[in-house]
Amino acid sequence: MIDHNIELKIEDIAFSKLDLKALFPGRDKVELEMGFCSGLFLSEYANSKPDTGFLGLEISRKFIVRGHRNLQKRLLQDNVRTVCFEGIAIIKELLPFNSLDAIHIYFPDPWPKKKHHKFRTVRFENLIMMHNRLKKGGKIYIATDHPEYGEFIAKEISLTGEFFNILPYGMDDRKIKTKWEKKQIADCWPINYFLLEKK
Ligand SMILES: C[S@@+](CC[C@H](N)C(=O)[O-])C[C@H]1O[C@@H](n2cnc3c(N)ncnc32)[C@H](O)[C@@H]1O
């Protein structure tokens, strides 16, 4: 159990790029989860990789309070930091180029109306921006249960062939699942999974 505050306050970090070596001393690898919500995946996954630092991003204060409670209770070592802010802005403005080993995006908000597609986290422009923040060989893990967003993501990914290898990836490859994922699997709801590797 971790008994100190793991949240980085936006007002303290907004003025320069994050120093990941200082944030995660002794850990050379860093992964990021967008929209960690309950923190159940983040805590279990971070426990499974004690040598890796994890940055959890969550836009909602209500969810992050719940997420922190779970993280504080479940984390076995001090390898997670969180930020309550819009995740794309954090990746774009505060993360150095070539700094991340992986980005996890599970069940991002689907923004179903066409006029709102520009708010979708997984779209070409954001994938290219994330590509710059990943190390060579770094990965982006994506899952969605929204069929039309799944088709949209597949199309956006198909435009990124110069930048990423598209790897096979499905439910059976995911040993640790998110809270929403477990619920959708229990309800037999179809899920689309995607895995990209930076060339
Ligand atoms: C459908 S929930 C999925 C939660 C969790 N990933 C899971 O699979 O159980 C989407 C989460 O992403 C968060 N979120 C949505 N847009 C975000 C953004 N732009 N930046 C950070 N978090 C975001 C929401 O507040 C919510 O917690």
Image (spheres, rainbow, N blue to C red):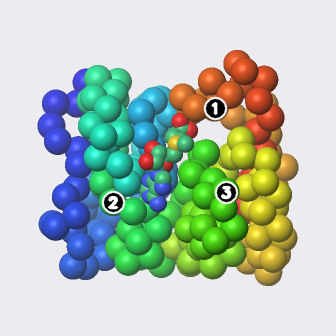
Q: In the figure, is residue 197 to the left or right of 118?
A: right
Seen at 41% across and 71% down, the residue is: 89
Name which residue type carries label 2: Phe
* Cβ at disc 2 under 8 Å from ligand 1: yes
Corner quadrant of residue 166:
bottom right
Q: Position of residue 44 (x, y in %)?
A: 47, 29
Say which of marks 1 and 3 sits in front.
Answer: 3
Q: Position of residue 45 (x, y in %)?
A: 50, 35
Disc 3 crowd, CA 10 A, few/some/many (<14, 14-19, 20+): few
- Frontmost residue, 147 versus 129: 147
Q: Give the residue at mark 3.
A: 112
Whole-angstrom CA distance, mark 2 to mark 1, is: 23 Å
Name which residue type carries label 3: Pro
Task: Report helix, strand or loop for mark 2.
Answer: loop
- Frontmost residue, 3 versus 118: 118
191 to 158, vertically: above or below: above
The mark that comes first in sequence, 3 or 2, is: 2
Seen at 82% across and 57% down, the residue is: 151
Disc 1 crowd, CA 10 A, few/some/many (<14, 14-19, 20+): many
Q: Position of residue 182 (x, y in %)?
A: 63, 25
Whole-angstrom CA distance, mark 3 to mark 2, is: 22 Å
- Which numbered marker is on residue 35? none
